[in-house]
Image (spheres, rainbow, N blue to C red):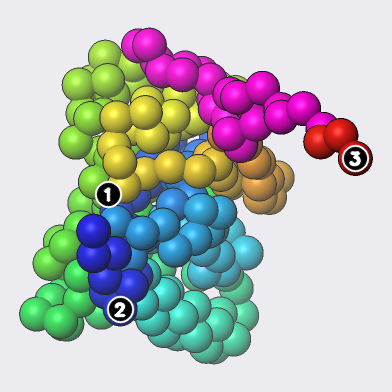
Amino acid sequence: MDLNLDAPHSMGTTIVGVSYNGGVVLGADSRTSTGVYVANRASDKITQLTDNVYVCRSGSAADSQIVSDYVRYFLHQHTIQLGQPATVKVAANLIRLLSYSNKNMLETGLIVGGWDKYEGGKIYSVPLGGTILEQPFAIGGSGSAYLYGFFDQAWKEGMTKDEAEKLVVKAVSLAIARDGASGGVVRTVIINSEGVTRNFYPGDTHPLWHEELEPTTSLLDILSAPEPMNT
């Protein structure tokens, strides 16, 4: 089988953003692939733009990283000029502007989430092509195809912080179970008026779904260890 290790790094992925009463929760898996080869099993797809705004990245790793870097630079200049932090809407619209202006070259979909003193917690989705959508929750990446019905049933207004984070972790773990391009660990970022909290959920803590096997780290977990040789 040709692994095609020269293929562009792609984050066939699962990214999620959920708003709750008082802030937002962002979540993502950690698998970065190059064709069928897993180039990085513990990548961080939730990138900081400012102290109060983060972005979840999917699609081409290179494209999403360069858009994030440009927007972080522009927001830094914006904050210096205004003397106060940029709002979530400003950050999302900068990403929209870059994505739409370069839509023939970029292959990335992004979810922007954060909190500001004017509008509170906000989630914006900027999918492939540069559309911008303000939503109470957003999902993206290859794993999102398995989650639309789940979110229609599970999301509700007025969730607490803990309920929102549990929903995000459950959604990403469901996508990891079904989507071959999603995997690894689940990372979450909680953003509210008190600041930012990052959490990490290793693969062996995810719930198992529909006859999934327990994760193993080695053939030695399956096969009995060989007997020592007599000298």
Q: Label 1 belongs to which residue?
A: 141
Q: Are marks 2 and 3 in contact (CB under 8 Å)?
A: no
Secondary structure under tag 1 reads loop
Residue drawn at (49%, 85%), measured in percent from left and top?
73
Secondary structure under tag 2 reads loop
Extreme residue in the right direction:
231
User: Where is residue 60 shown, x and y percent of the image?
Assistant: 29, 69
Front in this rendered view, residue 160 or 180: 180
Disc 2 to disc 1, how far (Cα)? 22 Å
> N-terminal of the two: label 1 or label 3?
1
Q: Label 2 belongs to which residue?
A: 6
> N-terminal of the two: label 2 or label 3?
2
Q: Which corner quadrant holds the C terminus?
A: top right
Extreme residue in the front direction:
231
Q: Is 230 part of what is drawn in magenta?
A: no
The answer to whether residue 205 is left or right of residue 116 is right
Q: Amino acid at mark 2?
A: Asp
Q: Amino acid at mark 3?
A: Thr
- Which region of the structure is painted magenta? 206-228
Residue drawn at (41%, 75%), measured in percent from left and top?
65
Q: Label 3 belongs to which residue?
A: 231
Q: Amino acid at mark 1?
A: Gly
The answer to whether residue 176 is left or right of residue 203 is left
On residue 110, which mark appears?
none
Disc 1 residue crowd, few under 14, some 14–19, many 20+, Cα 10 Å: many
> N-terminal of the two: label 2 or label 1?
2
Disc 2 residue crowd, few under 14, some 14–19, many 20+, Cα 10 Å: few
User: Where is residue 49 shown, x and y percent of the image?
Assistant: 52, 69
